[in-house]
Amino acid sequence: MDIAEAAVVGAGPIGLEMGAALKRAGVDYIHLEAKQIGNTISWYPHQVRFFSSPERIAICGVPLHTVDQAKASREEYLAYLRGIVEQFDLEVRTYERVTKITKGDNDFTLVTEKQGGGKQEYQVRNVILAIGDMAWPRMLHIPGEDSNHVDHYFDEPHKYFRQELLIVGGKNSAVEAAIRCYRLGAKVSLSYRGEKFNPESIKYWLLPEIEMLVKTGKIKFYPNTEPVEIRRQDVSLLDVKRKEIITVGADFVLLMTGYVADMKLFETAGAELEPESRAPVVNMETMESTVPGLFVAGTVAAGTQRHYRLFIENCHAHVAKIVKKLTGKTIDGHAINPLALEEMPES
């Protein structure tokens, strides 16, 4: 059994920033990741660009530069994260999933499963969960949702060339997929349970284009609808206002209905969770949960977000708060994103 002062679980941007900060502070820690560095970002659509500007998603005090000085693409950011790991020589035990956290009198026991088989136990005094809030897609639980031509993730548009594609959703991911697939040559329909697009939920440069494509009929828009059954060649949509069923042809269906957080590790550790979002109850000054020694970093602090309030850019401060609680040391702007210091409450 390995023994350490702390364990960081999750190796997304905030998890990596957390690991680098602990290393700089001289804390003996282990870092565990169920899959690969930046796993959630790796399943973003190819060439998609971040909503946030590069300076706001930079970590560890290292500037993020893009080839055209625009917002970072998926590929640029993954390369940046790999560079962070190498620059700071971070030891992340990838493809090792934490399956259980048990609180003892003065420490925690973590049980892990490795991709190649076998289990491992670690004993640590503190645990920092930085596991993100997008573990699984939000399921609709309707007939046909598990069909081969239905997907909850938009990879890239090529397979939809000259195909009928129904996209379900009306926020940024759905809108961007609709525009890209239309440009590629797909016949795109868009079903959205809302009346109209919300400017706060869509990248500002996409909103005028989707509105134009809908207005001109190049993308067929079905507002106030939700799917009730998916079949091989079409989908039944319920018009929630008129209480009528609309049948829309579809060779493929993309369900861009959002994602949910996996809060099982918080539950096994005994942490108190909010009833609706399942967000952990934390002390916002220290990011410590209701279980002493169990800390929260990153977007998982909000649980499952229906209306997003936590992103990479406003979670940097979590790192500074946790390091200060564990070590008594105050982090300067060279160790994390300097913008985090502006977001930290004054002591």
Image: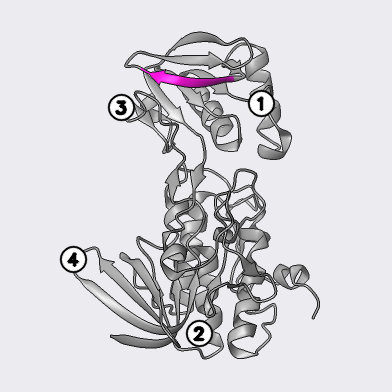
**Element under disc 4:** loop
Q: Position of residue 200 (x, y in %)?
A: 72, 39
Foreground mark, 4 or 1? Answer: 4
Q: Position of residue 13 (x, y in %)?
A: 53, 64
- Cα distance in 3D space between marks 4 and 2: 29 Å
Q: Earlier in the sequence, mark 4 or mark 1?
A: 4
**Element under disc 2:** helix
Q: Identify the mark at residue 117; answer none if there is no mark.
A: 4
Q: Is residue 282 left or right of residue 10?
A: right
Q: Contact, CB < 8 Å: mark 4 with mark 1?
A: no
Q: Which residue is mark 3?
A: 147
Q: Residue at coordinates 65% horizontally, 53% vertically from top-left?
A: 69
**Element under disc 1:** helix
How many C-alpha atoms fall within 10 Å of the one at disc 2: few (<14), some, or many (≥20)? Answer: some
Residue 137 in sight in this render: yes
Q: Earlier in the sequence, mark 1 or mark 2?
A: 2
- Cα distance in 3D space between marks 3 and 1: 31 Å
- Cα distance in 3D space between marks 1 and 2: 46 Å
How many C-alpha atoms fall within 10 Å of the one at disc 4: few (<14), some, or many (≥20)? Answer: few
Q: Which residue is mark 2?
A: 23
- Residue type, label 1: Glu
- Residue lying at the far right of the rendered structure: 346
Does the segment drawn in magenta span residue 249?
no
- Cα distance in 3D space between marks 4 and 1: 49 Å
Magenta part of the chain: 225-230
- Residue type, label 3: Ser
Does the segment drawn in magenta span residue 229?
yes
